Image: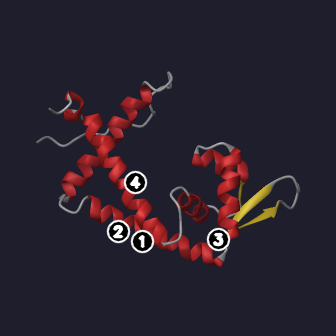
């Protein structure tokens, strides 16, 4: 007998998220990366030379966790650490040429993963799902440790 929880949105969301994460880990492994490392590479393509504290904040992790990730990426020649010109205590992280190539491969990987995940969805269903997931995220965020809901405008869903 199935649990009543198995019929909830939360169950399906967690199940889909776990499968999505497993598939992304599989694809990242083919690039020689572990989950989470791709986020550093993509953040650095947006803004090269970020500080360690900025990276930690953007990744929503503690600075020692960010530092460990950067050390692993540096050991593989994907990023390099440089001291700031004005303050030797400030460390900035930049991509190497190999890191840039790997970041481009990550962007292609995300496109592949997206196409796999929504392969049988028409464009209208894709848009609708994105809007519903944003709305779900705002609902959960509103109740997360008393944080206010994101101040994003409510997405209108098309009439069916």
In space, the residues marked 4 and 1 are separated at their CA atoms by: 16 Å
Q: Identify the residue shown where x is 14% and y is 40%.
A: 159
Farthest left residue in view: 160
The vertical placement of 159 against 115, above or below, is above
For the residues labelled 2 and 1, the Cα–Cα distance comes to 6 Å
Q: Which residue is mark 3?
A: 78
Crowd band around label 3 with a 10 angstrom C-alpha radius: few (<14), some (14–19), many (20+): many
Residue at 53% across / 66% down in the picture?
A: 33
Q: Position of residue 37 (x, y in %)?
A: 56, 60
Q: Tell me whether the residue at label 2 lies in contact with that at label 1, contact meaning CB atoms closer than 8 angstroms.
A: yes
Extreme residue toward the front, this view: 1
Q: Quadrant of the C terminus?
A: top left
Which one is nearer the viewer's eye here, 70 or 115?
70
Distance from Cα at disc 3 to Cα at disc 4 = 23 Å
Q: Looking at the rendering, which quadrant does residue 27 occupy?
A: bottom left
Quickly name the residue at label 4.
Answer: 21
Residue 9 point in image, percent of width and height = 25, 35
| Residue 129 spot, x, y in % from top left | 26, 47
Disc 4 crowd, CA 10 A, few/some/many (<14, 14-19, 20+):
few
Q: Could you tell which of marks 4 and 1 lies nearer the N-terminus?
A: 4
User: What mark, if any, has residue 62 been given in the picture?
Assistant: none
State the quadrant of the N terminus.
top left
- In the image, taking residue 146 as reference, residue 43 lies left or right, namely right
Q: Which residue is mark 1?
A: 108
Quick one: label 2 or label 3, which is nearer the N terminus?
Answer: 3
Q: Crowding near pointer 1: few (<14 within 10 Å), some, many (20+)?
A: few
**Secondary structure at numbered mark 4:** helix
- Asked whether, in this view, residue 19 is left or right of residue 44, the answer is left
Cα distance between the residues tagged 2 and 3: 22 Å
Circle on res. 112: 2
| Sequence-first tag of 2 and 4 | 4
């Amino acid at each position: 007998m199935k649990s009543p929880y198995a019929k909830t949105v939360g169950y399906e969301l967690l199940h889909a998220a776990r499968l999505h994460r497993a598939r992304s880990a599989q694809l990242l492994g083919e690039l020689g990366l572990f989950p989470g490392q791709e986020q550093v590479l993509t953040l650095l393509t947006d803004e090269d030379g970020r500080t360690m504290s900025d990276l930690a904040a953007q990744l929503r992790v503690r600075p020692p966790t960010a530092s460990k990730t950067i050390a692993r990426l540096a050991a593989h020649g994907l990023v390099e650490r440089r001291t700031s010109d004005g303050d030797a205590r400030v460390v900035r992280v930049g991509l190497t040429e190999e890191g840039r190539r790997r970041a481009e491969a990550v962007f292609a990987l995300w496109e592949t993963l997206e196409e796999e995940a929504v392969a049988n969805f028409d464009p209208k269903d894709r848009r609708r799902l994105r809007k519903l997931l944003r709305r779900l995220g705002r609902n959960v965020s509103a109740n997360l440790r008393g944080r206010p809901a994101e101040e994003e405008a409510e997405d209108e869903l098309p009439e069916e």
